[in-house]
Image (cartoon, rainbow, N blue to C red):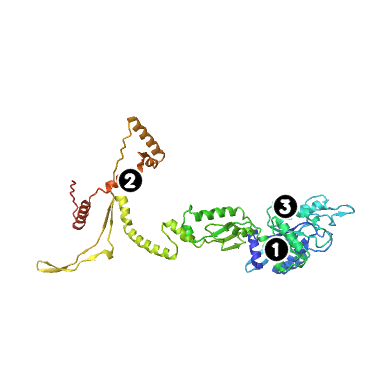
Amino acid sequence: MDKFDLYRDIASRTGGDIYVGVVGPVRTGKSTLIKQVMQQFVIDGIANPDERSRAVDEIPQSADGKTIMTTQPRFVPNEAVRVSVGENITVNMRLIDCVGYLVDGALGAQEDGKERMVSTPWSNEDMPFSKAAEIGTQKVIKEHSTIALAVTTDGSFGSIKREDYVEAEERVISELKECKKPFVIVLNVANVNAESAQNLKEELEKKYDAPVVVKNALNMDEDDISEILESVLLEFSVKTIDFDLPRWVQALPIDCDVVREIIERVKDMAKDVDKMRDYDKIDSYFENATFWKQPSSISLDAGKGRVHVKMSTGDDVFFKVASEQCGIDVKDDFDLLKELKILCKDREKIGKIQSAMEQVETLGYGIVAPTMDEIELNQPEILRQGQQYGVKLSAKAPSLHIMKVDVETEVSPIIGSEQQSKDMVEGMLQDFENDKQAIMNTNIFGRSLSTLVADGINNKLQTVPTDAEQKLRKTLGRIVNEGKGGVICILL
């Protein structure tokens, strides 16, 4: 990641203040690490020459050996400096050094065979060096820093063994996790390519469930520091995961299998994706999906805590879903285009009668007016009226007249006694109160009431004779064309 982007994203997550707490056991190279970060990553970005000079003077000293060099927490530089990291982008930057937790074999905690007493700003009385180191380290972890680097070592430099660091290391990392501070473990080793160093890295990552970066603090360059800060950036929590789905999926109902599957998998995934570094777990939740492929791309906006996941379905899923949702057989693009053309024609026909159907619902009568292409012009005729002549132009066109007619039917089963009939009516009324549709499922002589009612209605509709239909049509035509409003109807 570009240095400027890295600064900007971390500043976005920390509110513009990048305060890096460098903590860990004593004699692990914390001061050396701070020195490298200041020299290669901070000093050049300080625009004010006086602040730059002062920051150089405040870089901590470091040295080999067992003797503890840092005696109290210190801010480097003492006052946060504004670092320019690009056009119109500045951040407040400083690092916080601390003594760290004591380990066996480190020198400087005792004097003349007794624990060394030191004065601190946290007490009016002198306190043991070990207690002051603990308080200072905890303040750096909990109060002074916005992000942290937990520095430990494999014991490959100096004369303190690896096992002597473990207890203090565990304590530091436990406290960082407890206060939910974004942090990364820096494993300071003499040879970063050594097999033992890489093995220890894997062991620590598994043990602490935290990223471990293997570096030689004394020989780090700008890329090494960027790698460390990138790892810290990915330790911030995820705020939003955006799933970019094919647009056609948005047209599906919530109970569709395609929609249901991705919702279930996203819910499961959300329980496991907590930090930005967890983005690489997303793929695994779609490995055996029925309808969905694994994400085609996953991108991060680390500064905003957003993860963008682009999803796609299997090759044949679209046509399968289209067939199910539309009730037609669509196997490929050809079938789709063919059915669309048919549907467009049907839609045009339906559009013609839609307003008429709305009139029928409200008024009981609706009219579908003819379109221009349905009008037939008759041959012009010469018309004579007295001594004058004219031209007669006539035309005709089909119109649709739709009427709502309520069809009545009765179902009158003979049950038996009066009491039996009353019991049946009471049972049906009770069902009607609870569920109006339930009464239609009532079984009468082996058939449901809904079937009997439907048969009765259909029988009546089919009893209208053909000649009566023709006469009704002819009568309606005369009313429309001749403007005869009065109708006398005699039914025989």
Callout 1: 10 Å neighbours few (<14), some, many (20+)? many
Query: Is 258 or 489 nearer to us in this picture?
Result: 258
Instruction: Check residue 390 in the rendering and tell me which mark sits there, or answer none.
Output: none
Q: Amino acid at mark 3?
A: Ser
Q: Amino acid at mark 1?
A: Ile
The reply to whether discs 2 and 3 touch (Cβ–Cβ < 8 Å) is no
* First in residue order: circle 1 vs circle 2: 1
* First in residue order: circle 2 vs circle 3: 3
Instruction: Check residue 174 in the rendering and tell me which mark sits there, or answer none.
Output: 3
Report, in whole angstroms, how far the alpha carbon at label 3 lies from the one at label 1: 20 Å
Badge nearest the viewer, 1 or 2: 2
Report, in whole angstroms, how far the alpha carbon at label 1 lies from the one at label 2: 77 Å
* First in residue order: circle 3 vs circle 1: 3
Regarding residue 22, the answer to whether it shows in the image is yes
Q: Quadrant of the N terminus?
A: bottom right
Q: Amino acid at mark 2?
A: Ala
Q: Residue at x 46, y 58 (%)?
A: 321
Q: Secondary structure at mark 2?
A: helix
Q: Secondary structure at mark 1?
A: helix
Q: Is residue 490 above or below residue 28?
A: above
Report, in whole angstroms, how far the alpha carbon at label 2 lies from the one at label 3: 74 Å
Q: Secondary structure at mark 3?
A: helix
x and y percentages locating residue 233 in the rendered image = 66, 61
* Pointer 1 residue: 228
x and y percentages locating residue 484 in the rendered image = 18, 54
Callout 3: 10 Å neighbours few (<14), some, many (20+)? few
